[in-house]
Amino acid sequence: MSIWEYANPVKFMRTSGAVLPWTVAGAAVCTVTGLVWGFLTPEDYRQGSTVKIVFLHVPAAMMAINIWVMMLVASLIWLIRRHHVSALAAKAAAPIGAVMTVIGLITGAVWGQPMWGTWWEWDPRLTSFLILLLFYIGYIALWSAVEDPDSAADLTGVLCLVGSVFALLSRYAVFFWNQGLHQGASLSVQSGERMSAVYRYPLYLTMLGFGLMFLSLMLVRTRTEIRRRRLAALQAREMRA
Amino acid sequence: MIALLRRDLRLAVRAGGGFGLGVAFFLILCALVPFGVGPDTSALQPIAAGILWLGALLACLLSLDRIFALDHEDGSLDLLATSPLPLEGAVAVKALAHWITTGLPLIVAAPLFGILLHLPAAAIPALLMSLLLGTPALSMLGAFGAAVTVGLRRGGLLLSLLVLPLYIPTLIFGTEMIRRGQDGGDTMPPLLFLAGITAGTLAVIPFAAAAALRVNLR
């Protein structure tokens, strides 16, 4: 029993089909409960009710970064071990990551308007998120531009590797370029200073919910890609016969 | 390798090669900016560094598709791939040729355009150093983008979408260095960052670009 067994599409389809209802249910329960709980929390003494945006903003931003990391790992697995499921999972994850980035940016703008008095500020964190969105867009565009699926997987894989290096580099370069308005990490394991438990627990729940939501969406999209591949193979066989 | 370099340079310089078009584009951009923002020194001086670097970026971008596209069309890229010279070396040489034909003329012309944009004379050395250290990275990254998009029909627009985000760190450190030269600040940290980015791309990008080319030639 090893993780590489799931590189077999048949095995992947069977297992993901069995797991999928549970992750969907878990995502729905965690996200809805977390958001409702978050909505019922008391208002912050300085930020008022706007603090509740955090329950969408932070999970989306967290997933935006984690999805890129997942795509990087999947691209590496494809480039090194040539497992098709891995390449398809990276392809399936990219639009979800782009949407998460957009959600993070929009909720941030809605929150920034009353708190900082501006929709947008060229702050390092905001800027690096915009750059991340550009990388997502380039990655998705390259997938749709290349016709041969294996070449597309190879090229996007290489792009993902190079892009990761430069996305990280840009992240530190923008700190050099401009000092920030955005606060540092709100949830940190090391630092003692944290947000109040009233907000923290619903936030953990929505983060878990967003994680499960990504997992479900990614599985559904990967299954669709595999079925599309099978369909294309069947059609090609029919053409030859 | 030297033969390849000389061939690429000769092709670029001869008629239809587009040599000098980058500089002409740079000149037009610098001439248009005052129409957009007004001719006052107070309006031009703060943005001169940014305009010069953006001009260099765009001029470099415009000539990128030439790196591999023509050779791909007439089949000489396949010959290069099967030649004893490793493809990584060929990529590096082609990026170097691109830099000599577009980056180097830009660097020579940049002080002149800096004066057009009222860049103070004190910032000229920083401008030259930043371009000298930064533009090789632009050519290398551009060669990677060109290698990824070489076989595509609608490659041009995609190329800019892929390459421009990769240019962000170079742009940040390049303009920061000129700005510091302008204000009399310490230009050493951005200079070192620029040199680091260029050295890093020189070391890594030929492999990535050659991998992408092999996929496209398959």
Image (cartoon, coloured by chain):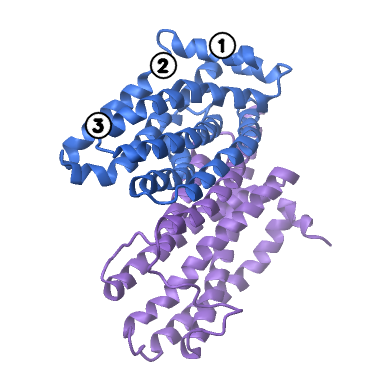
Chain colours: A purple, B blue
Q: Is residue A179 left or right of residue A31?
A: left
Q: Secondary structure at mark 2?
A: loop
Q: Which chain is indicated by disc 2?
A: B
Q: CA distance from mark 2 to mark 3?
A: 23 Å
Task: Quarter of the image for the N terminus of chain B: give it.
Answer: top right
The residue at the point 68 percent across, 57 percent down is A13
Q: Which chain is indicated by disc 3?
A: B
Q: Tell which of B138 and B217 is nearer to you.
A: B138
The residue at the point 60 percent across, 18 percent down is B77
The residue at the point 42 percent across, 76 percent down is A54
Q: Amino acid at mark 3?
A: Leu
| Contact (Cβ within 8 Å) of mark 2 with mark 3 | no
Q: Which chain is indicated by disc 1?
A: B
Task: Quarter of the image for the C terminus of chain B: give it.
Answer: top right
Q: Amino acid at mark 2?
A: Phe
Residue beneath disc 2? B19
Residue beneath disc 3? B116
Circle on res. B118: none
Q: If you read the primary sequence from the N terminus, does the residue marked by circle 2 or circle 3 appear first?
A: 2
Residue beneath disc 1? B7
Of tags 2 and 3, which is closer to the observer? 3
**Residue B81 visible somewhere in the drawing:** yes
Q: Secondary structure at mark 3?
A: helix
Q: Quadrant of residue A232?
A: top right
Q: Is residue B171 left or right of residue A9?
A: left
Whether B50 is drawn above or below A22: the answer is: above
Q: Secondary structure at mark 1?
A: helix
